[in-house]
Amino acid sequence: MSTNPIVTGKLVCVALNDQQQLDKLDATFNEAPYKAAPTQPVLYFKPHNTWNTDGATIAWNEEGLVVGASLTVVFGKECCRTSAEEALSYVEGYTLTHDFSLPEKSYYRPDIKGKCQDGTAPVGAVVVPASDVADPQALTVVTQVNGETVGELPVSQLHRGVAELISIISNIMTLQPGDAIAVGFPGDRHPVKQGDKVTSSIAGVTELTNQVEA
Amino acid sequence: MSTNPIVTGKLVCVALNDQQQLDKLDATFNEAPYKAAPTQPVLYFKPHNTWNTDGATIAWNEEGLVVGASLTVVFGKECCRTSAEEALSYVEGYTLTHDFSLPEKSYYRPDIKGKCQDGTAPVGAVVVPASDVADPQALTVVTQVNGETVGELPVSQLHRGVAELISIISNIMTLQPGDAIAVGFPGDRHPVKQGDKVTSSIAGVTELTNQVEA
């Protein structure tokens, strides 16, 4: 099994946080049984069997794989019930997470099978110190597959921004050193095939590359 | 924050595995959007900020708390894609988990907030070696609040038994040493109030006691 030197506690991922995706899904949310858009962040975990590293090869799955990339906030000190105003002071630094998952058929059931396959959550090798990032909301995550851009998500396009998420999540569960939050993925995850090379980057900040098993 | 010496990797919990509860919910499952009962185990994680120990006091939550207890399978070696026939050979031993959670209003959204409050997953102090348990399906988990029995769940009443669950889950994600599975809780979680003492036991095998903060 792979491990990752950065994430040692929990890797919390935020789903349905791309405002463009939410706008598209808006009509669906008004149907039964929800009858309303989510009022709270939709969270899921990538457990420790999923953790992986920059450069790692991702095992192919016969059901297919899709990928998304997210700016990821890494914690270096305990953060419990903070306000949005104070939230960024708990951030040790920033990196990237690739979430490789099985193609999703429905939002109606927690997709543990699709999200928890071994080695499907590579986290960048480098944590860029928070002091080097003036404003995380100004960053943009770009994903390329075999050199072609397939996704581009400005953090400012997230429905809930970095500081607000840290505040809300830290009011649910304490964030500890070694914990990380992947703050939001593009609504349309990109399908990949065997042998594809996936590179995500934040210009001038960090980069993460993984290849799907050939 | 509390830690637990037994669970160091992931604590996987199985929801909706009490056959009596499933029978009651059957009509609901046939409504939109599911239109069918779950065909796969419904899993959730208790992340590491929830881990706690026998004897620990559980923080009160103003939204209320409910409790359920589950037989818990602890792994001592890596278990990947095993069959139900081989599954029990990967079990190091058995213990108990209390899952204290916020009262649940709906099954339609993954209940991260309700399940992930700090310190809400005490795991028994003792792992009873698998060699001392002839048949985990023959065990019964009894829960008492302030000395009064509020729940009694024979493992044989679980929709999916221990070996089948290990097989299915190990085909989704590798189980590693320090991982554990709470195989099933009574369908009706029991509400507790401030100061309540909760003791769960498996006769002759193990016991777990926690008190809700007064």
Image (cartoon, coloured by chain):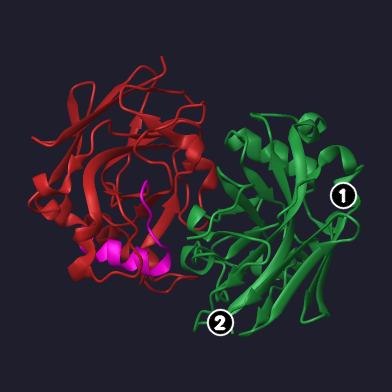
Chain colours: A red, B green
Residue at x-position 72% and y-position 74%: B198
Horizontally, residue A90 falls left or right of residue B153, namely left
Magenta segment boundaries in residue numbering:
A161-178
Secondary structure of residue under mark 2: loop
Q: Amino acid at mark 2?
A: Gly
Secondary structure of residue under mark 1: helix
Q: Please say whether residue A187 is one of the residues in the magenta stretch.
A: no
Residue at x-position 28% and y-position 52%: A183
Please tell me whether residue B121 is drawn above or below residue B197 in the rendered image: above
Report crowding for label 1: few under 14, some 14 to 19, many 20 or more residues within 10 A (C-alpha).
some
Report crowding for label 2: few under 14, some 14 to 19, many 20 or more residues within 10 A (C-alpha).
some
Instruction: Tell how many labels.
Output: 2
Residue at which label 1 appears: B137
Q: Amino acid at mark 1?
A: Gln
Please tell me whether residue A113 is drawn above or below residue B152 in the rendered image: above
Contact (Cβ within 8 Å) of mark 2 with mark 1: no
Predominant secondary structure, magenta span: helix
Residue at which label 2 appears: B64
- Distance, label 2 to label 1, CA atoms, is 32 Å
Q: Is residue B20 among the parts visible in the rendering? A: no
Q: Nearer the viewer, residue A64 or A48?
A: A48
Residue A8 image offset from top left, x and y in percent: 42, 42
Residue at x-position 23% and y-position 63%: A87
